[in-house]
Structure formats: structure tokens, C-alpha cells
Image (cartoon, rainbow, N blue to C red):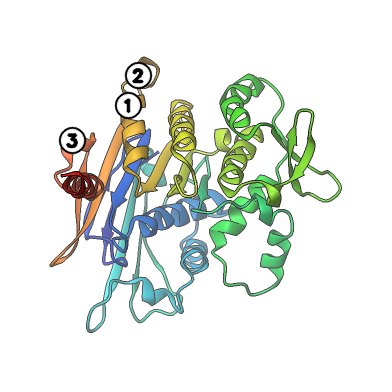
Amino acid sequence: MLVSASIQNFGPLPNAEFHFAPGLNVVIGENGCGKTQLLKLLYSLLKVQADSKELTKTALQKSCAEKLVGVFRPDSLGRLVKRRQGRGKSEIALSMKDERESLVISFASQASSAVQVDTLPEAGLRKSPVYLPTRELVTLSPWFVPLYDNYHLEFEESWRDTVSLLGSPTLKGPREKTVAMLVKPLEDAMGGKVVVDAATGRFYLQMPGEGRMEMPLVAEGLRKIAMLARLISTGTLLEQGYLFWDEPETNLNPKLIKLIALCIMNLCQQGIQVFVASHSLFLLRELEMLAEQPEFRKVKQRYFSLKATADGVGLEQGDSVDDLQTLVLLDEELKQSDRFMGLEG
């Protein structure tokens, strides 16, 4: 479990220490304040630790540099350092519940591809992270992974990671009942089950009495639901320790956003540490209301607000939304209500 991250001079993110909950972590804020960058940064470093075959300084330095460049796609690694005149240095420290897994790295603004490992973890991560971008990825299977691996493509490496997970076989064994419980509301919303053609590797929506529908013909919002359902049915999300989801509400109507909120809380209840970046007050409120239900009261939560200030991006954090003094989402909702009431008057 990721306990905290101390971040200095990384992109637009504030120089601060982020303290995370073992269950649900929600990052909100204005565009350009670093919500997505935070998720990508944490995902990249955890993914390196989970995939590393050897925990040597040389190997980790190379892997961290390659992963950060692959996920963020800068012209050079140093471009990720906070913009300022002269030379700068970015430092990121991840503190894990198991202190042997903690990692500290740094790199300079003039660095093209060099990462310095300042604290070498003594143990690798037992569970790997999953990253879900704002768009669906099921329509990229199965052709995207071999294309990405063999050609220079301007796609984020996190997409390649997730598409490769979608192709895993469905889960069998003791956890099938848990999978069925988690997937059922998603299948009800889609009106069918996600199936894969064994010969081609393509995904379809199998609808009772209507046969199979090619996934590109399914509405994009439902394709996002299909991506989540697939990752649960293969056991991937149950076996991974961390889920990073950027703007899960994108292309979803309020009814489906409520469903996504429920699925997020169910995954937290299964012991997965979830990180969500969102612009949606509707999603935020749904998560808050679900957290008050008896079955989810044990799910620990943490909320983060990023807001542009005269001195850069500021950070507020707390165990509930009420702990945040700055909630731009709510402010804009109230302003809109005032404008609407003014029109009626």
C-alpha cells in the first residue's frame, strides 16, 4: 500500500507531501493543475517496482527513466521538471506501508534520460498497478500491443500496459463468485456480456436474443463499462493492488456514473487502493453517499484539491470533502444555479 508521496519540482504539481488512504483517493481540481500528472507519476513508479526482475540501482534507474518517458511522452526526461529559469531538480519519494518497498528518485532539468535512485527499495511490489485513461481501450485489442512494441508510436505506454491486461483469460476458481458479483451490475447496464473471439482476439458484446455486437458499434460510454467489466472478469483488478483511473465520468450519463461509483467502492472493499482524478461533482457526491452506507463504512477515504494560485498550484487534502476549503466544482455549480435563478427572476 502507498502511504504517502513527497513531490518536489515535478511538472505543475505543488511541492508537497500527499498522504493517501488505503482505500479511496480522489483528486479534484481545475485543468492544468496536475491531476492526471499525479496519477501517471504514481502509476509509473509503482509499475516499475512491480515489474522489475532485479532491484539493483542500475536496473531501476534505467527502468524509471524509460517508464516516465514512455508514459508522459516528453521530448526529454528533464522536461518533466517544474518550469523555471536556470537548472532545476525533481525529487519524488514514495513511502510504502512495507518500508522495504519505499523508493526515492530524482532527476535534473538538463537530464535527457538519467534518473538517480536515492533510496533503493529492498523488496519489490507484490501487486502491480492498473491505469485506466479517460477513453476506452477495448477497441484497441488485440492489434495495439504488437504495433506499439514494433513501431515508434506517439501513444502513452500506460495504454499498452492496460490493453495487454485486457487479453488475459477469464478467472476460474474460488474467486469466481466475487467476480460474478462485481460484474453483474456492469453487464446489466450494458445489456450483455463482454466476450472475446478466440481466433481474432477481438471483443464483442454478447446480448441475449440478439447475438454478438462488434465492440466499435457499442456506445463509447458502454465501452468504458466493458473495459472495466473485462478487467474484473479476468481477475486482473482483483490481483492488482492499485487502480489509477483518470476521469472515469467521461462520456457517461449520470446513471452510469452512479454505477461507476458503486464499482469503485466495491473494488476498495476488495482491498484495492484506488486513485481517481475527476471534474465531476456528481461522481464526488455519489462516492460520498456510498461511503456512508453500512457496507462501505470501513473503506478509508482521502480527498485532494488542486487549485491554481498566484504562486503556482496549491494543495488541500483531508479525510472528507468537508475538510477542503477550496472546492472549485461546487463553487461553479453554485454560480451556475445563481445565473439560472437570475434568468427566472
Give above or below for 73 relative to 29. Answer: below
SS type, badge 3: helix
Quickly name the residue at label 3. Answer: 322
User: For this rendering, which residue is in front, 110 or 73?
Assistant: 73
Residue at the top extreme of this rendering: 294
Where is residue 68? Give x, y as percent: 46, 65
What is the three-letter code of the residue carrying label 1?
A: Met
Amino acid identity at mark 3: Asp
Q: Can you identify the residue that label 2 sits on?
A: 293
Q: CA distance from mark 2 to mark 1?
A: 7 Å
Contact check, label 2 and label 1, Cβ < 8 Å: yes
148 on left or right of 5: right
Which residue is label 1 attached to?
289
Work out whether residue 139 can be spotted.
Answer: yes
- Residue 5 vs 157, above or below: the answer is above
Is residue 4 visible in the rendered image? The answer is no
Residue at the image point whose x is 38% and y is 38% from the top: 98
Left or right for 280, reference 191 = left
Q: Quadrant of the C terminus?
A: top left
Given residues 170 and 33, the one toward you in this image is 33
Q: Residues within 10 Å of mark 3 (few under 14, many from 20)?
A: few
Q: Quadrant of the N terminus?
A: top left
- Pick whichever, 257 or 152, lies toward us: 257
Neighbours of disc 2 within 10 Å: few (<14), some (14-19), many (20+): few
Kind of residue at badge 2: Gln
Marks 1 and 3 sit apart, C-alpha to C-alpha, by 13 Å
Residue 288, picture quadrant:
top left
Residue at image location 72% in from the left, 26% down from the top:
172
| Residue lying at 31% horizontally and 64% vertically, measured from the top left | 32
Q: Quadrant of residue 154?
A: bottom right
Residue 38 at x, y percent in the picture: 36, 56
Expressed as whole percent of the image width and height from the top left, the position of residue 67 reads 51, 63
